[in-house]
């Protein structure tokens, strides 16, 4: 349920109303926009008398919300959420490119890629230290050593780092990581999501390969219920019957999510297609469709990459993609 307050309501009046709601066992989420203040009521609202609330002097209107996700719901929070990552903002008209290799392979490799992608306009560096792989015999990442290499690359290039977490027990190792990524396989790892809700770090939450948009938003709700509202949603393709690409990139997720939620949404065309030559057209299409950012895999030697070389573009190819991305942004911004 949401209660829209009338303009010019005093802080004291609002706090009195919030106290009244809490006295009835409800949690209250306050969203202050430019023109309206909205109170989101979370909990069992079945016993709340809407007619009584509508009769209060400071309330303009009251509405029940049928969707199971509350904090992530745009009805609770009409204005776009802007996630600030060390000064680089995503959402609310702010656009960022996150680029880097699927796996961190060496200090030299990740540092060189960080410098090249930063020069092309990617303000955030991605790289996998822990790698969930389908085969137990595939390269699983450098783990803690990989995070150290990411931090070293950050010091050289000045790019905040994005890397994936797989286990709650690894969280202390992510103290200096700027954005914690939750991969598609862990989108419904609810214990992990709850723990990330207790942090204040930005969380990049990827959609599962067989999950609906509603389920993605419910996973975001798990994090937000713990108090962390710094969430970036990522569409990375879903599994369909099509075999020409690794997954099917659901670009319609961009307007749908933006209609349902205030959280920023970015697109990962690399994992979506699994083919490097398809990354550019899908990246450009995502920008035109209104995405708040892109995550692109870049490797300086894709043929010899330890993971996902087939979907990784070279630094030169990334230069071309980034140049065209920013031109499209100039047109639609």
Image: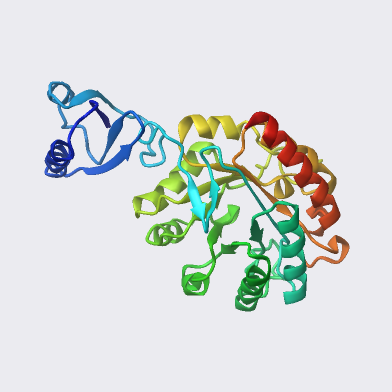
Q: Is residue 22 left or right of residue 100?
A: left
Q: Eyeballing the image, is 95 above or below 129?
A: above
- Measured as percent of width and height from the top left, residue 68 is found at 37, 37
Left or right, 120 with respect to 75, comes to right
Instruction: Using the rendered view, name the quadrant where residue 300 is placed.
Output: bottom right
User: Left of 205 or right of it: where is 56?
Assistant: left
Residue furthest bottom in the image: 145
Residue 232 shows in this picture = yes
Of residues 244 and 202, the one drawn nearer to the viewer in this rendering:
202
Q: Residue at x 55, y 37 (%)?
A: 93
User: Which residue is depicted at the point 68% across and 34% down?
Assistant: 330
Examine the rendering and report whether any part of residue 279 can be seen. no
| Tally of numbered tags | 0
Q: Quadrant of the N terminus?
A: top left
Give the camera-side residue of 143 and 186. 143
- Image color mode: rainbow
Residue 332 percent across, percent down from the top left: 65, 30
Q: Where is 315 relative to 95, above or below?
A: below
x, y percent for residue 232 = 52, 48
Left/right of residue 244 with respect to residue 168 in the rendered view: right
Residue at horizontal 77%, vertical 57%? 298
Q: Position of residue 57 (x, y in %)?
A: 13, 24
Residue at the spot 72% in from the left edge and 34% down from the top edge: 328
Foreground pick, 241 / 218 = 218
- Can you say which quadrant of the picture contains the C terminus? top right
């Amino acid at each position: 349920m949401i209660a829209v307050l009338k303009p010019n309501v005093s802080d004291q009046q609002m706090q009195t109303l919030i106290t009244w709601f809490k006295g009835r066992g409800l949690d209250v989420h306050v969203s202050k926009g430019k023109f309206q203040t909205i109170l989101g009521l979370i909990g069992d609202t079945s016993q709340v008398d809407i007619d009584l609330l509508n009769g209060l002097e400071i309330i303009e209107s009251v509405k029940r919300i049928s969707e199971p996700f509350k904090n992530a719901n745009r009805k609770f929070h009409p204005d776009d959420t802007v996630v600030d990552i060390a000064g680089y903002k995503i959402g609310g008209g702010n656009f960022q490119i996150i680029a880097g290799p699927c796996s961190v392979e060496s200090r030299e490799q990740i540092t060189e890629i960080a410098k090249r992608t930063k020069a092309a306009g990617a303000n955030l560096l991605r790289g996998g230290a822990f790698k969930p792989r389908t085969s137990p015999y595939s390269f699983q990442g450098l783990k803690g050593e990989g995070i150290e290499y990411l931090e070293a690359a950050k010091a050289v290039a000045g790019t905040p780092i994005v890397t994936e977490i797989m286990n709650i027990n690894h969280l202390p190792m992510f103290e200096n990581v700027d954005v914690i990524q939750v991969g598609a396989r862990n989108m419904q790892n609810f214990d992990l999501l709850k723990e990330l809700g207790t942090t204040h770090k930005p969380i990049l939450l990827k959609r599962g390969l067989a999950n609906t948009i509603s389920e993605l938003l419910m996973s975001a709700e798990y994090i937000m219920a713990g108090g962390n509202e710094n969430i970036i949603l990522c569409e990375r393709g879903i599994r369909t019957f099509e075999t020409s690409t690794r997954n099917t990139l659901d670009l319609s997720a961009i307007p749908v999510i933006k209609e349902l939620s205030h959280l920023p949404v970015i697109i990962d065309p690399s994992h979506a297609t699994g083919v490097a030559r398809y990354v550019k057209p899908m990246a450009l299409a995502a920008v035109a469709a209104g995405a708040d950012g892109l995550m692109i895999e870049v490797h300086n030697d894709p043929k010899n990459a330890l993971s996902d070389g087939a979907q990784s573009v070279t630094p030169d190819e990334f230069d071309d993609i980034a140049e065209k991305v920013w031109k499209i942004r100039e047109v639609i911004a």
